[in-house]
């Protein structure tokens, strides 16, 4: 008998789970369109400084949306799973943006594509890391950003109580981990992170932070 999957805590989500999710053909985060929260921040004028890194780009929908909204930006996508990065490259090609973007397969806990970047988007990646991996990941992003560069991240909130999925962050916990990594949080607000398992989107936090 199988029980209800627990909500991950400090141990994070095992990296092999992502390959298994793509192998199954139904990763919860693959919604076949850009995240609504990403489209909203693009309309606000966030993520306007290039080049831009989409950290954990998955199959590339957010990356393509950035290209549509930021006509002059060069973009880089990075993800752990080869199946995802192959699809992201194809998405850029089909949208006509292959001359403006490249996609790398890498483990962001250990390496970040060569910058420097003016902006970094993390739409649903920070919340998968363990307490041990999170500082290394954030240090890599901090190093890759120009001084004053912008990080926009979306994570699950502790207001989301559905089982399984990534860990949940309390507002001040999230602020503290970013500030400890050398970022200055300018915006932190409730949002929805869309998945195929949450009809109205999971409760999340949308954060904008600048590199000190």
Image (cartoon, rainbow, N blue to C red):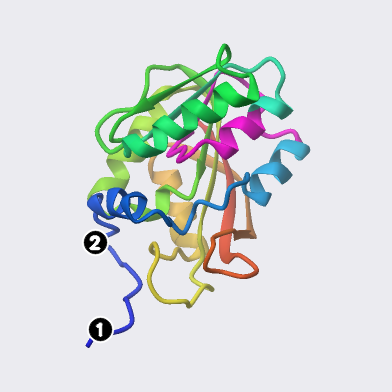
Q: Position of residue 18 (x, y in %)?
A: 32, 51
Residue drawn at x 60%, y 52% is 206
Residue at x 46%, y 59% (from the top left corner): 28
Res 149 visible? no
Residue 85 visible to the viewer: yes
Task: Looking at the image, tell me whether mark 2 or mark 1 is earlier in sequence order.
Answer: 1
Question: Is residue 57 shown in magenta?
Answer: yes
Position in image of residue 57 (x %, y %) = 47, 37
Residue 4 in the image: state x and y as whole percent. 33, 82
Question: In the orientation shown, which residue stands out farthest toward the bottom?
Answer: 1
Of residues 77 and 128, the one drawn nearer to the viewer in this rendering = 77
Q: Farthest residue toward the top?
A: 99
Q: Which mark is residue 11?
A: 2
- Residue labelled with disc 1: 2
Q: Nearer the viewer, residue 204 or 30?
A: 30
Q: How many numbered marks appear?
A: 2
Q: Give the magenta range.
A: 45-66
Image quarter where the N terminus lies is bottom left
Q: Is residue 87 above or below residue 103?
A: below
**Residue drawn at (64%, 19%) of the image:** 96
């Amino acid at each position: 008998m199988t029980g209800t999957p627990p909500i991950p805590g400090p141990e994070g989500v095992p990296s092999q789970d992502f390959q298994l999710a793509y192998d199954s053909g139904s990763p919860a985060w693959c919604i076949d369109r850009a995240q609504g929260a990403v489209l909203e921040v693009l309309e606000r004028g966030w993520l306007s400084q290039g080049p831009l890194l989409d950290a954990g780009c998955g199959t590339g929908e957010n990356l393509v949306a950035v290209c549509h909204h930021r006509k002059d930006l060069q973009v880089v996508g990075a993800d752990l799973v080869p199946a995802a990065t192959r699809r992201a490259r194809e998405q850029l090609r089909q949208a006509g943006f292959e001359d403006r973007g490249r996609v790398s397969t890498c483990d962001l806990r250990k390496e970040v594509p060569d910058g420097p970047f003016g902006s970094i988007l993390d739409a649903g990646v920070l919340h998968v890391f363990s307490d041990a991996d999170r500082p290394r990941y954030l240090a890599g992003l901090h190093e890759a950003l120009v001084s004053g560069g912008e990080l926009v991240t979306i994570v699950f909130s502790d207001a989301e109580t559905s089982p399984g999925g990534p860990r949940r962050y309390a507002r001040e916990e999230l602020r503290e981990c970013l500030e400890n990594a050398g970022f200055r949080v300018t915006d932190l607000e409730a949002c929805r992170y869309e998945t195929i398992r949450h009809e109205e989107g999971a409760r999340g936090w949308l954060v904008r932070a600048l590199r000190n």
